[in-house]
C-alpha cells in the first residue's frame, strides 16, 4: 500500500551534524529511515554499557504523529547493540535534539563513529485518547495476564 500523502517532517540540522546524510530509507519498501550518529569523536560503549548518541537533528512532526526510534537489526545481530528504550517515542511537540540511547549487550566494546547508522525512525499515527470511567465488560481471556494464552 502506498501512502499518497505521507506526513511532512521539518528538520533542523544542528552544527555538529553538518555534512551528515539526512534520515533516509535504505530501500523502496523500508518502514524505517536511518538515523546517523552526529558525534564529533568516536564514542566507546563497554560491554553492558550505555551511551546517549546525538543525531544532530531537531524535528517538527505534524500534530497527531509520533516518531518511534527503533533498533537497527544489523547492529543487534552483528554487534549486540540495540536501542535501550525501544521503541523510543519522539512526540509531536518536542523540539529538542533527537538522541538515541544505545546499549551494548555484547562481550566486546563497541565504538560508534561519526555518520554511522545507529537507529531507525518510524513515523506512526498517535491519536490522543479520551479516558473515562465506566464498565469495561468481560472477554474470554478475562484477567489472564502474562503467559495466560499459552506458548
Image: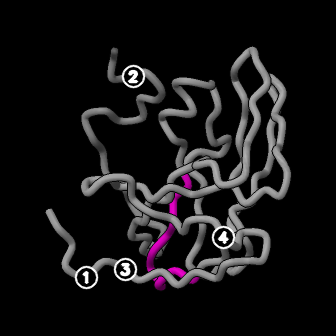
Q: Earlier in the sequence, mark 4 or mark 2?
A: 4
Q: Which residue is mark 3?
A: 7
Q: CA distance from mark 4 to mark 2?
A: 51 Å
Above-or-below relation of 62 to 102: below
| Viewer-proximal residue among 19 and 121 | 19
Q: Which residue is mark 4?
A: 19
Please provide percent x and percent y for residue 1.
14, 62
Q: Which residue is mark 2?
A: 148
| Viewer-proximal residue among 68 and 131 | 68
Question: Are there few (<14), some (14-19), or many (20+) residues within 10 Å of tag 3?
Answer: some
Q: Do the residues under discs 3 and 1 have CB atoms within 8 angstroms?
A: yes
Q: Quadrant of residue 82?
A: top right
Describe the element under mark 4 as helix, strand or loop.
Answer: loop
Above-or-below relation of 73 to 12: above
Please provide percent x and percent y for residue 149.
33, 23
Q: Earlier in the sequence, mark 1 or mark 2?
A: 1
Dot in front, 4 or 2: 4
Q: Which residue is mark 1?
A: 5
Describe the element under mark 2 as helix, strand or loop.
Answer: loop
Q: Which span of residues is magenta-colored?
A: 60-69
Please provide percent x and percent y for residue 8.
41, 83
Amino acid at each position: 500500500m502506498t501512502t499518497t500523502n505521507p506526513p511532512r517532517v521539518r528538520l533542523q540540522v544542528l552544527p555538529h551534524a553538518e555534512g551528515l546524510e539526512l534520515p533516509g530509507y535504505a530501500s523502496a519498501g523500508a518502514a524505517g529511515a536511518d538515523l546517523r550518529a552526529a558525534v564529533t569523536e568516536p564514542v566507546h560503549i563497554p560491554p553492558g554499557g550505555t551511551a546517549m548518541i546525538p543525531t544532530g537533528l531537531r524535528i517538527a512532526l505534524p500534530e497527531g504523529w509520533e516518531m518511534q526510534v527503533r533498533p537497527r537489526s544489523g547492529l543487534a545481530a552483528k554487534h549486540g547493540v540495540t536501542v535501550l528504550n525501544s521503541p523510543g517515542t519522539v512526540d509531536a511537540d518536542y523540539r529538542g535534539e533527537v538522541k538515541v540511547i544505545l546499549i551494548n549487550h555484547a562481550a566486546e566494546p563497541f565504538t560508534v563513529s561519526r555518520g554511522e547508522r545507529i537507529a531507525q525512525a518510524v513515523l506512526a499515527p498517535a491519536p490522543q485518547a479520551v479516558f473515562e470511567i465506566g464498565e469495561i465488560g468481560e472477554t474470554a481471556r478475562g484477567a489472564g495476564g502474562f503467559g495466560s494464552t499459552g506458548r
